[in-house]
Amino acid sequence: DAKTTQPNSMESNEEEPVHLPCNHSTISGTDYIHWYRQLPSQGPEYVIHGLTSNVNNRMASLAIAEDRKSSTLILHRATLRDAAVYYCINFGNEKLTFGTGTRLTIIP
Amino acid sequence: GAVVSQHPSRVICKSGTSVKIECRSLDFQATTMFWYRQFPKKSLMLMATSNEGSKATYEQGVEKDKFLINHASLTLSTLTVTSAHPEDSSFYICSATYAGTDHTDTQYFGPGTRLTVL
């Protein structure tokens, strides 16, 4: 499975945008980029996914580099409820392989 | 939409007993269900993949005789931890997927079951 690299932790102030980076330099041409997040003591929650083009949904935006070797999850206006571990995953071989993710802390 | 439930949410059992965890897709038919395990402060580890009516496919290092998976219908999968021991104490999470029109097989996760073996 293609490996992704994310910062271990990030902090952001409440009501400000958050940009969560992910490197996936070994991604194959057909692998989608998925983002999930996990709140404390809960199962992961799907956030967004994309292949080549930037994507938007009600939760977030996903900006994918032209060479697909990196992507950025954008939370436009962070709230305290966005505090979670965010996982960036290259979806291939019908399996999700979770790395260690980025622990996002929101400062009130 | 795409809600997955798990039952029980928390279970405490004695060493040597068996525990069954249910995973249900409430508003969709799941072509595939997955079982994960998560130890404290660690990431999720995939244990097995199951398709309705088929035998589960276990990941390397996961004992199929210890972690019995039954996927009897398109909305229900069960994981039975047999002869549980304290080292099996963990957070067990299931997920379900159905083939969407974009073929990306987004997984929808249950809330997890915390198992504590005394």
Image (tube, coloured by chain):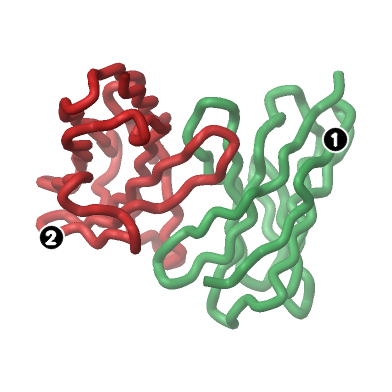
Chain in green on the image: A
Label 1 sits on a secondary structure element that is: strand
Q: Is residue A82 left or right of residue B39?
A: right
User: Is A15 above or below relative to A98?
Assistant: above
Name which residue lies at 82% across and 40% down: A10
In contact (CB < 8 Å): disc 2 and disc 1: no
Q: Numbered disc 1: what chain?
A: A
Residue B3 appears in view:
no
**Label drawn at residue A11:** 1
Report the number of numbered marks.
2
Q: Is residue B7 above or below residue A62?
A: above
Question: Color of chain B here?
Answer: red
User: How much space separates mark 2 and mark 1, taking CA atoms?
Assistant: 45 Å
Q: Residue at x 58, y 47 (%)?
A: A36
Tell me the kind of residue under disc 2: Ser
Identify the subunit bearing mark 2: B
Q: Amino acid at mark 1?
A: Glu
Marks 2 and 1 belong to one chain: no
Question: Percent x, y for residue B82?
Answer: 17, 37
Residue A96 visible to the viewer? yes
Q: Residue at x 76, y 68 (%)?
A: A70
Q: Is residue B35 left or right of residue B71?
A: right
Q: Position of residue B20 (x, y in %)?
A: 19, 31
Residue B109 pos. (x, y %): 42, 40
Which residue corresponds to mark 2?
B54
